[in-house]
Image (spheres, helix red, strand yellow):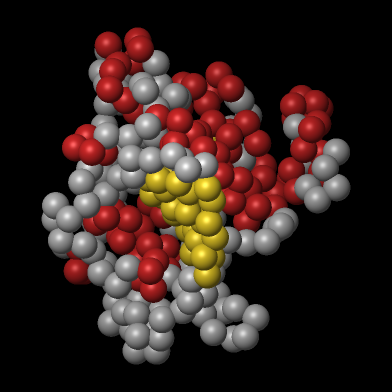
């Protein structure tokens, strides 16, 4: 996909990178990325993917902007909170101002079993920044069933985790890459993990992890660097420490194990 003169100037700092160059920038332009959630993680993911020149960006969110969002959801504005603007519309307007070359597709809805496969199927890769386990598992299962790469992140009060999942593909030794269900077999009971609203969260944390999430998406699209698949990055903001741990394929997991029991999304209905 050829780059215009405007795009060559806009992405000049990418194009001079030996690892990326013109071919990598063209792959970014041709890519279609779906971002789940236009919140704390979704805000930096959307901004950096748009700035990087990803050609088509979809955003899923059913919420409106409120003042309590603005401490971390930097893609939105005070005027948007005052007017109760849909987060999808607010994000689309900001992306258009940042990079009018990006085609933004808004999905003002809550992702569920009735629409997940249809929405996700239209994209090459998914960045999940949702704030609840039910959606996280739903997205993971749907991406596996559709053969889509998933870059998933989650944040707590002062800590976070990030990984890439492509369990539909095999590792060098022939075993499948681990799925999200190799990390967590099933959805935790309600109330076991407090929500952001209940526990609080430091705003800058979502900027750190959301930016890293965007970086992993760019790497997967451009085919550069070492994929985070099979590994997980954990970050403790208070101690300023990162830790990378290995994730192993669990042959007994119900999604991509030896005898999978999850073959559709009917369990979410």
Q: Residue 91: percent from the left, percent from the top?
A: 43, 27
Residue at screen point 51% across, 38% down: 208
Does 73 sit left or right of 165 as displayed? left
Q: Where 84 falls versus 46 (above or below)?
A: above
Toward the left, the furthest residue is 190
Toward the bottom, the furthest residue is 258
Determine which quarter of the picture holds residue 110: top left
Q: Where 27 falls versus 137 (above or below)?
A: above
Q: Residue 184: percent from the left, percent from the top?
A: 32, 68
Residue at screen point 72% across, 56% down: 224
The C terminus appears in which quarter of the rendering? bottom left
Determine which quarter of the picture holds residue 211: top right
Residue at screen point 51% across, 80% down: 176
Tell me if I can see residue 149 in this picture: no
Q: Nearer the viewer, residue 234 or 117?
A: 234
Tell me if I can see residue 79 in this picture: yes
Determine which quarter of the picture holds residue 199: top left
Q: Residue 108: percent from the left, percent from the top?
A: 31, 36
Q: How many dots with numbers?
A: 0
Q: Where 8 falls versus 169 (above or below)?
A: above
Q: Where 183 falls versus 120 (above or below)?
A: below
Q: Nearer the viewer, residue 66 or 246?
A: 246
Q: Residue 79: percent from the left, percent from the top?
A: 35, 10
Residue at screen point 85% across, 47% down: 18
The N terminus appears in which quarter of the rendering? top right
């Amino acid at each position: 996909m050829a780059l215009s003169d405007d795009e060559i100037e806009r992405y000049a700092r990418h194009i001079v990178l030996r690892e990326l160059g013109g071919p990598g920038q063209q792959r970014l332009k041709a890519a279609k990325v779906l971002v789940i959630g236009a919140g704390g993680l979704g805000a930096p993911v959307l901004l950096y993917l748009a700035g990087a020149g990803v050609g088509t960006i979809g955003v899923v969110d059913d919420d409106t902007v409120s003042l309590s969002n603005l401490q971390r959801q930097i893609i939105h504005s005070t005027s948007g909170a005052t007017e109760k603007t849909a987060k999808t519309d607010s994000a689309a307007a900001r992306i258009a101002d940042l990079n009018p070359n990006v085609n933004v597709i808004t999905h003002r809805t809550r992702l569920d079993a009735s629409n997940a496969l249809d929405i996700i199927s239209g994209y090459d890769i998914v960045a999940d920044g949702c704030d609840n386990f039910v959606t996280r598992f739903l997205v993971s299962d749907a991406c596996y069933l559709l053969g889509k790469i998933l870059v998933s992140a989650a944040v707590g009060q002062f800590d976070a985790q990030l990984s890439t999942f492509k369990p539909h593909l095999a590792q060098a030794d022939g075993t499948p890459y681990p799925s999200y269900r190799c990390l967590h077999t099933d959805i935790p009971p309600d109330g076991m993990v407090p929500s952001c609203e209940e526990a609080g969260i430091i705003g800058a944390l979502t900027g750190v992890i959301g930016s890293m999430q965007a970086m992993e998406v760019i790497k997967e699209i451009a085919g550069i660097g070492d994929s985070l698949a099979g590994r997980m990055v954990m970050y403790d903001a208070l101690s300023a420490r990162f830790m990378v741990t290995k994730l192993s394929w669990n042959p007994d997991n119900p999604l991509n194990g030896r005898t999978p029991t999850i073959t559709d999304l009917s369990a979410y209905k």
